[in-house]
Image: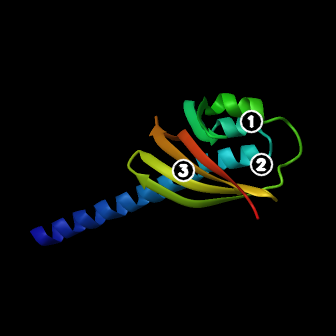
């Protein structure tokens, strides 16, 4: 009897954990899609939904390490206009409790970006809190 109850409790625990992970995976995908869709469509308000207000973006500019507030950067960079000629791929999402990261590839005709974004689940919502990236020219 004890073995049966323990087995049942273990099955319920595994099922609930799997459901929570699938649910969080979908929510992380949704947050990442705000970022990618907002950038593709030159829609700052959509992109802004993905980021925590104090999110940082860190990258190498020339030979120098650069760190900026992500929302401030995109507010200046994104201007209304035609849809960007690019393809976006979510290559990987990893989740551990209330922390997650995603590897994204954004392909333009002559170059691509590899973005690594870190997310935290804050008040029930996944938000990008940090982004690093690399730009690579195509040969």
Q: Which mark is residue 131?
A: none
The residue lying furthest to the front in this view is 63
Give the SS element for disc 2.
helix
Q: Quadrant of residue 6?
A: bottom left
Callouts 2 and 3 close, C-beta under 8 Å: no
Where residue 87 appears, as percent x and y from the top left, is 75, 59
Q: Which mark is residue 44?
A: 1
Q: Badge 2: how crowded within 10 Å, few (<14), some, or many (20+)?
A: some
How far is disc 2 from disc 1 in space, using C-alphas? 10 Å
Give the SS element for disc 1.
helix
The residue lying furthest to the left in this view is 2
Please tell me which residue lies in front, 127 or 12. 127
Please tell me which residue lies in front, 18 or 80. 80
Q: Is residue 58 left or right of residue 6?
A: right
Callouts 2 and 1 close, C-beta under 8 Å: no
Above or below, 114 against 72 in this view is below
N-terminal of the pair, mark 2 or mark 3, is: 3
Residue 50 shows up from this direction: no
At 77% from the left edge and 48% from the top edge, which residue is drawn? 40
At 46% from the left edge and 41% from the top edge, which residue is drawn? 121
Give the SS element for disc 3.
helix
How far is disc 3 from disc 1 in space, using C-alphas? 19 Å
Q: Badge 3: how crowded within 10 Å, few (<14), some, or many (20+)?
A: many
Where residue 15 appears, as percent x and y from the top left, is 36, 64
Q: Quadrant of residue 59?
A: top right
Where residue 67 appears, as percent x and y from the top left, is 58, 32
N-terminal of the pair, mark 3 or mark 1, is: 3
Q: Quadrant of the C terminus?
A: bottom right
Dot 3 corresponds to which residue? 28
């Amino acid at each position: 009897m004890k073995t049966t109850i323990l087995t049942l409790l273990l099955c319920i625990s595994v099922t609930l954990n799997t459901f929570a992970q699938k649910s969080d995976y979908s929510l992380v995908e949704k947050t990442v899609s705000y970022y990618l869709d907002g950038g593709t469509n030159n829609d700052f308000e959509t992109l802004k939904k993905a980021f925590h207000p104090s999110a940082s973006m860190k990258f190498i500019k020339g030979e120098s390490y650069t760190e900026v507030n992500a929302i401030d950067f995109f507010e200046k960079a994104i201007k209304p206009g035609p849809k960007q000629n690019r393809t976006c791929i979510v290559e990987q999402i990893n989740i551990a409790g209330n922390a997650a990261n995603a590897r994204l590839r954004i392909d333009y005709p002559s170059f691509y970006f590899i973005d690594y974004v870190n997310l935290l689940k804050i008040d029930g919502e996944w938000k990008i809190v940090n982004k690093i990236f690399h730009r690579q020219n195509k040969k």
